[in-house]
Image (cartoon, helix red, strand yellow):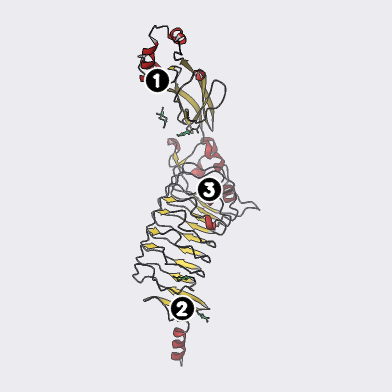
């Protein structure tokens, strides 16, 4: 009858050495250890090291590492979803050279450190959505850059993702980064991800998207480029001329709206005519005109510019070179140039150049270096024409107490 057959099915493949509460099956010569939803507080120590599939979802495991997965060189599938894992000890998975799929979703991870995922040289699916990640190390994915097909980091608190490593994931097929706080996509990052078929960036903080061939493939399929699924709705897009390239691609559907500028707020991206994606060239509104500084003191030159997009300000020295940061000078993008300790040869006409996607504007600032009295004090007396004894002048200079009002400080006109 049917009863003996049923009993036969149940007993066949049941393994004797199995962690308490778990179910272990040796089907098709591959061992599965099934410990989901068993109230476990840690990974059971007596898992057969030959197991191929290990399911530990829906327990109360708080950390993994140590000997938990030691010698499990044949493990292919590891599920740790919906526990309370807040700590992965470095090298926790180091022996899992056959692992293809790692599920860590629904835990309490806040960081992925450089060695937390080390050793997973065959990993294809890494699922870490619904954690509390704020930081992912640039090295975290190093051991499986070329094998990974599926990366899910959605529903975390990431402001930044390691684009440097993502751009090298040559086998990547699906990338889920939705519902994070990402405000920046590195330019050209998708250029060599030829297998990418799905990118979800929904609900982040992107204001702009860099031009990328990926989007061209996503939006206007060519014979060489299959249609890929691309989502970036729910981002505060700033619809100016920098996004015109995207608007020019033909596309019908999707949910993207503009957040700024004010007159385009809330409007459906694909409904706005190209002519309305405009930029404003830079306009220098205020700048230092002339600055007198005593040799050796600090000079702060300022140049303030407006425009859309926000202009970046560079400074050009009197000998026509762009001023970079050095031990003596700091050039800030907001238009402030600091020369920490001026020397006589800093004297001259500086040019500030404000640049954005729509153009540039320039202004000239004269920096006058008042030479310090050199031994003998001759230069000094000639220079300022006030007969102060050299000894006193040195003392005053070192205190910055010349009493020349604001003339040694940067004055914005
Ligand atoms: C599973 O069964 C095969 C034979 O079907 C056997 O060779 C192997 O040792 C068993 N594995 C375990 C872990 O029991
Ligand atoms: C792992 O394998 C090594 C070498 O075979 C052995 O010495 C060690 O006891 C094993 N550890 C565990 C936890 O199985
Ligand atoms: C100089 O360094 C500051 C931060 O210290 C940075 O904001 C600025 O962009 C740097 N400027 C250049 C020209 O690299
Ligand atoms: C520009 O940035 C620098 C460094 O962050 C800051 O010290 C300076 O006050 C800023 N200048 C203006 C005009 O905002």
**Disc 1 element:** loop
Is there a contact, CB below 8 Å, between mark 3 and mark 2? no
Task: Tell me: is circle 3 under 8 Å from ligand 3.
Answer: no
How many neighbours does mark 3 have within 10 angstroms: few (below 14), some (14-19), or many (20 or more)? Answer: few
Judge whether 376 appears above or below 73 on screen.
above
- Identify which residue is drawn at 43% across, 17% down: 293
State the quadrant of the C terminus.
Answer: top left
Q: Position of residue 123 (x, y in %)?
A: 52, 62
Residue 161 percent location from the top left of the image: 47, 49
With respect to residue 22, does 258 lie above or below?
A: above
Residue reaching furthest to the right: 223
The disc at residue 164 is 3
The residue located at (53%, 57%) in the rendering is 143
Q: Secondary structure beneath disc 3?
A: helix
Q: Earlier in the sequence, mark 1 or mark 2?
A: 2
Q: Give the residue pinned by disc 1.
A: 409
Quarter of the view holding residue 187: top right
Mark nearest the camera among 1 and 2 is 1
The answer to whether the residue labelled 1 contacts the one labelled 2, judged by CB atoms less than 8 Å apart, is no
The span from disc 3 to disc 2 (Cα, nearest Å) is: 42 Å
Sequence order check, earlier mark of 3 and 1? 3
Circle 2 residue: 25
**Badge 2 density bin: few <14, some 14–19, many ≥20, Cα 10 Å:** many
Asked which quadrant contains residue 300, the reply is: top left
Name the side, left or right, on which 21 lies relative to 78: left
Instruction: Between residue 256 and residue 360, name the one nearer to us.
Output: 360
Report helix, strand or loop for mark 2: strand
């Amino acid at each position: 009858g049917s009863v003996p057959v049923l009993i036969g099915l149940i007993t066949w493949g049941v393994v004797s050495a199995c962690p308490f509460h778990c179910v272990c099956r040796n089907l098709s010569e591959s061992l599965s250890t099934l410990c989901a939803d068993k109230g476990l507080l840690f990974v059971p120590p007596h898992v057969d090291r030959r197991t191929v599939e290990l399911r530990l979802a829906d327990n109360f495991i708080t950390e993994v590492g140590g000997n938990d997965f030691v010698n499990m060189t044949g493990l292919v599938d590891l599920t740790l979803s919906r526990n309370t894992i807040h700590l992965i000890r470095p090298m926790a998975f180091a022996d899992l050279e056959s692992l293809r799929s790692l599920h860590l979703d629904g835990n309490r991870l806040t960081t992925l450190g450089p060695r937390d995922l080390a050793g997973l040289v065959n990993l294809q699916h890494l699922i870490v959505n619904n954690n509390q990640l704020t930081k992912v190390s640039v090295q975290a994915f190093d051991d499986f850059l070329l094998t990974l097909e599926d990366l899910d980091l959605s529903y975390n608190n990431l402001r930044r993702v390691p684009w440097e490593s993502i751009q090298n994931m040559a086998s990547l097929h699906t990338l889920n980064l939705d519902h994070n706080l990402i405000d920046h996509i590195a330019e050209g990052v998708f250029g060599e991800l030829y297998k990418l078929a799905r990118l979800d960036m929904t609900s982040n903080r992107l204001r702009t998207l860099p031009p990328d061939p990926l989007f061209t493939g996503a939006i206007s399929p060519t014979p060489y480029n299959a249609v890929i699924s691309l989502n970036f709705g729910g981002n505060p897009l700033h619809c100016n001329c920098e996004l015109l390239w995207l608007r020019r691609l033909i596309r019908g559907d999707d949910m993207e709206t503009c957040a700024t500028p004010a007159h385009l707020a809330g409007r459906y991206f694909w409904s706005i005519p190209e002519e309305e994606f405009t930029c404003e060239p830079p306009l220098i509104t205020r700048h230092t005109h002339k600055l007198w500084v005593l040799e050796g003191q600090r000079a702060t030159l300022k140049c303030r510019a407006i425009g859309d997009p926000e202009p970046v300000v560079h400074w050009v020295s009197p000998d026509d070179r762009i001023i970079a940061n050095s031990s003596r000078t700091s050039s800030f993008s907001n238009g402030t140039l600091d020369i920490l300790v001026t020397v006589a040869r800093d004297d001259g006409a500086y040019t500030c150049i404000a640049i954005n996607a729509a153009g540039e504007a320039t202004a000239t600032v004269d920096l006058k270096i008042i030479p310090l009295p050199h031994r003998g004090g001759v230069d000094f007396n000639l220079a300022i024409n006030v007969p102060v004894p050299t000894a006193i002048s040195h003392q005053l200079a070192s205190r910055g107490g010349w009493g020349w009002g604001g003339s040694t400080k940067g004055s914005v006109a």
